[in-house]
Image: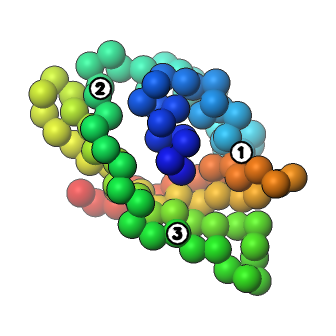
Amino acid sequence: MRSRYSAYVLLRFDYVRQTWWPESCPNDLENSNSDERLHWIGLTVRRHECSPQTPNEAIVEFVARYKVGGKAYRMHETSCFTRKDGRWFYVKGTQHEA
Protein backbone atom coordinates (compact mmCIF):
# COMPACT_ATOMS: atom_id res chain seq x y z
CA MET A 1 0.00 0.00 0.00
CA ARG A 2 2.73 2.45 0.92
CA SER A 3 4.64 1.76 -2.26
CA ARG A 4 1.53 2.41 -4.35
CA TYR A 5 0.92 5.70 -2.50
CA SER A 6 4.53 6.71 -3.16
CA ALA A 7 4.10 5.86 -6.84
CA TYR A 8 1.06 8.16 -7.02
CA VAL A 9 3.04 10.95 -5.33
CA LEU A 10 5.88 10.52 -7.83
CA LEU A 11 3.50 10.09 -10.80
CA ARG A 12 4.99 6.62 -11.41
CA PHE A 13 1.90 5.20 -13.08
CA ASP A 14 4.00 2.41 -14.57
CA TYR A 15 4.49 1.05 -11.04
CA VAL A 16 0.83 1.62 -10.11
CA ARG A 17 -0.19 -0.35 -13.22
CA GLN A 18 2.31 -3.16 -12.46
CA THR A 19 0.84 -3.58 -8.97
CA TRP A 20 -2.80 -3.55 -10.10
CA TRP A 21 -4.61 -6.82 -10.80
CA PRO A 22 -4.75 -6.86 -14.63
CA GLU A 23 -8.47 -7.64 -14.88
CA SER A 24 -9.46 -4.62 -12.77
CA CYS A 25 -6.89 -2.02 -13.86
CA PRO A 26 -8.51 0.91 -15.71
CA ASN A 27 -7.29 1.69 -19.21
CA ASP A 28 -7.12 5.44 -18.57
CA LEU A 29 -5.19 5.24 -15.30
CA GLU A 30 -2.66 7.94 -16.24
CA ASN A 31 -5.31 10.42 -17.42
CA SER A 32 -7.56 10.02 -14.39
CA ASN A 33 -4.79 10.56 -11.82
CA SER A 34 -2.43 13.11 -13.35
CA ASP A 35 -4.05 16.38 -12.27
CA GLU A 36 -1.09 18.78 -11.96
CA ARG A 37 -2.87 20.73 -9.22
CA LEU A 38 -3.18 17.64 -7.00
CA HIS A 39 -0.59 17.47 -4.22
CA TRP A 40 -0.47 14.37 -1.98
CA ILE A 41 0.27 15.26 1.65
CA GLY A 42 0.04 12.06 3.68
CA LEU A 43 -0.99 8.45 4.13
CA THR A 44 -2.30 6.72 7.24
CA VAL A 45 -2.83 2.97 7.19
CA ARG A 46 -5.61 2.33 9.69
CA ARG A 47 -5.59 -1.47 9.56
CA HIS A 48 -4.59 -4.44 7.50
CA GLU A 49 -5.84 -8.00 7.70
CA CYS A 50 -4.65 -11.25 6.22
CA SER A 51 -6.53 -14.36 7.31
CA PRO A 52 -4.70 -17.66 7.90
CA GLN A 53 -7.48 -19.33 5.91
CA THR A 54 -6.83 -17.08 2.89
CA PRO A 55 -3.14 -16.11 3.13
CA ASN A 56 -3.08 -14.83 -0.46
CA GLU A 57 -5.81 -12.26 0.16
CA ALA A 58 -5.62 -9.16 2.32
CA ILE A 59 -7.44 -5.94 3.01
CA VAL A 60 -5.94 -2.57 3.88
CA GLU A 61 -7.92 0.38 5.22
CA PHE A 62 -6.22 3.71 4.70
CA VAL A 63 -6.71 7.46 4.55
CA ALA A 64 -4.75 9.42 1.95
CA ARG A 65 -4.73 13.19 2.24
CA TYR A 66 -4.21 15.57 -0.64
CA LYS A 67 -4.72 19.17 -1.73
CA VAL A 68 -6.14 20.61 -4.90
CA GLY A 69 -5.91 24.34 -5.40
CA GLY A 70 -5.01 24.85 -1.74
CA LYS A 71 -8.06 22.98 -0.43
CA ALA A 72 -7.47 19.80 1.58
CA TYR A 73 -9.28 16.52 0.90
CA ARG A 74 -9.05 12.96 2.12
CA MET A 75 -9.66 9.63 0.49
CA HIS A 76 -10.73 6.91 2.92
CA GLU A 77 -10.75 3.45 1.36
CA THR A 78 -10.69 -0.23 2.20
CA SER A 79 -8.67 -1.98 -0.49
CA CYS A 80 -8.57 -5.64 -1.45
CA PHE A 81 -5.26 -7.19 -2.45
CA THR A 82 -4.33 -10.61 -3.76
CA ARG A 83 -0.93 -12.29 -3.85
CA LYS A 84 0.33 -14.19 -6.87
CA ASP A 85 3.84 -15.61 -7.25
CA GLY A 86 4.92 -13.76 -4.11
CA ARG A 87 3.74 -10.32 -5.31
CA TRP A 88 0.77 -8.36 -3.95
CA PHE A 89 -1.70 -6.79 -6.39
CA TYR A 90 -4.43 -4.23 -5.79
CA VAL A 91 -7.78 -5.69 -6.90
CA LYS A 92 -10.45 -3.17 -5.88
CA GLY A 93 -11.38 -0.66 -3.24
CA THR A 94 -14.44 0.58 -1.41
CA GLN A 95 -14.56 4.30 -0.65
CA HIS A 96 -15.86 5.44 2.74
CA GLU A 97 -17.80 8.64 3.30
CA ALA A 98 -15.54 11.46 4.38
The image quarter containing residue 28 is top right
The quarter of the image holding the C terminus is bottom left
Residue 83: image location, x then y, percent = 76, 58
Disc 1 packing (10 Å; few <14; some 14–19; many ≥20) = some
Q: CA distance from mark 1 to mark 2?
A: 25 Å
Which residue is found at the position 54% from the left and 41% from the top?
A: 4
Please report whichever mark, 3 or 1, sits nearer to the chain's N-terminal start.
Answer: 1
Q: How is the image coloured?
A: rainbow
Closer to the camera in the image, 9 or 69: 9
- Point out which mark residue 3 bears: none
- Point out which mark residue 38 bears: 2
Disc 3 packing (10 Å; few <14; some 14–19; many ≥20) = some
Residue 24: image location, x then y, percent = 67, 43
- Point out which mark residue 48 bears: 3
Q: Secondary structure at mark 2?
A: strand
- Point out which mark residue 21 bears: 1
Determine whether 20 is above or below 54 in the image: above
Residue furthest to the right: 85
Name the mark nearer the viewer: 3 or 1: 3
Q: CA distance from mark 2 to mark 3?
A: 26 Å
Q: Secondary structure at mark 1?
A: loop
Determine whether 41 is above or below 75 in the image: above
The image quarter containing residue 41 is top left
Q: CA distance from mark 3 to mark 1?
A: 18 Å
Q: Secondary structure at mark 3?
A: strand
Disc 2 packing (10 Å; few <14; some 14–19; many ≥20) = some
Determine whether 50 is above or below 18 in the image: below
